[in-house]
Amino acid sequence: MRSERLLLRPAERGDIETIVGWLNDADVQETLGVRGPLSQAGEERWFEHLQEEQGKSRWHFVVCLRADGRPLGLAGLDRIDTINGAAEIGASISQSPEWDKGYGTEVMEMLMDFGFGELRLHRIRLHVFTSNDRAVHVYENVGFRHEGTEREAFFRHGRYLDVHVMGILRSEWEARDRNRTWELD
């Protein structure tokens, strides 16, 4: 899958070291539900599980620049419920020097096009820390609506944090006036 500047590709075993580095970065951890240092061995176990579930209950991708193939982060659809047509979406541009360049918006657009346009989902949801203003802005910009707040749902740094629940329906995605990723040259 591709956008103007990015492409999504499946994770490969050779990506594990890079992914461990991203997920052990303190700035990245603040935006995700990662609690502490992750090991290479732990990520290798995650990778094996991911390979078993890829295309069944989840689709995970590495986000790369189209120009040179350099990996920038991770993205995917999880907890795919084929009966109800629902999934949870997640994305992380995992290199802080690449933040605020619009990549998050492109990734979300690609994932929604894939989820609604290929997987025939009816609804996509996400969870985001209320303090993550950058991500909330991206999600609102691509059409997600605030559906509720899970109060004190995540414990970090000695205190409980609130988590927003946001969602978008297929009809809302269809109503958005934009080119779909499959329409790009």
Image (cartoon, rainbow, N blue to C red):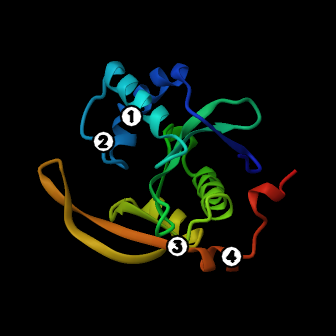
Q: Earlier in the sequence, mark 4 or mark 2?
A: 2
* For residue 29, above or below residue 149: above
Extreme-left residue of the structure: 158
Q: Which residue position is annotated with label 3?
A: 168
* For residue 69, above or below residue 183: above
Extreme-front residue of the structure: 83
Q: Earlier in the sequence, mark 1 or mark 3?
A: 1
Disc 4 is placed on an element classified as helix
Extreme-right residue of the structure: 185
Marks 2 and 1 in Cβ contact (< 8 Å)? yes
Q: From mark 1 to mark 4, how far is it between C-alphas?
A: 34 Å
The disc labelled 1 sits on which kind of residue? Leu
Marks 1 and 3 in Cβ contact (< 8 Å)? no
Q: Which residue position is annotated with label 1?
A: 23
For marks 4 and 2, give the one nearer the viewer.
4
Q: From mark 2 to mark 1, how far is it between C-alphas?
A: 7 Å
Q: Which mark is residue 34?
A: 2
* For residue 73, above or below residue 40: below
Q: Earlier in the sequence, mark 4 or mark 3?
A: 3
Q: Which mark is residue 70?
A: none
Q: From mark 4 to mark 3, how far is it between C-alphas?
A: 10 Å
The disc labelled 3 sits on which kind of residue? Ile
Q: Which mark is residue 174?
A: 4
Near-viewer residue (124 or 23)? 124
Counting from the top left corner in percent of width and height, residue 177 is at 75, 76
For marks 1 and 3, give the one nearer the viewer.
3
The disc labelled 4 sits on which kind of residue? Glu
Few, some or many residues within 10 Å of mark 3 (<14, 14–19, 20+): many
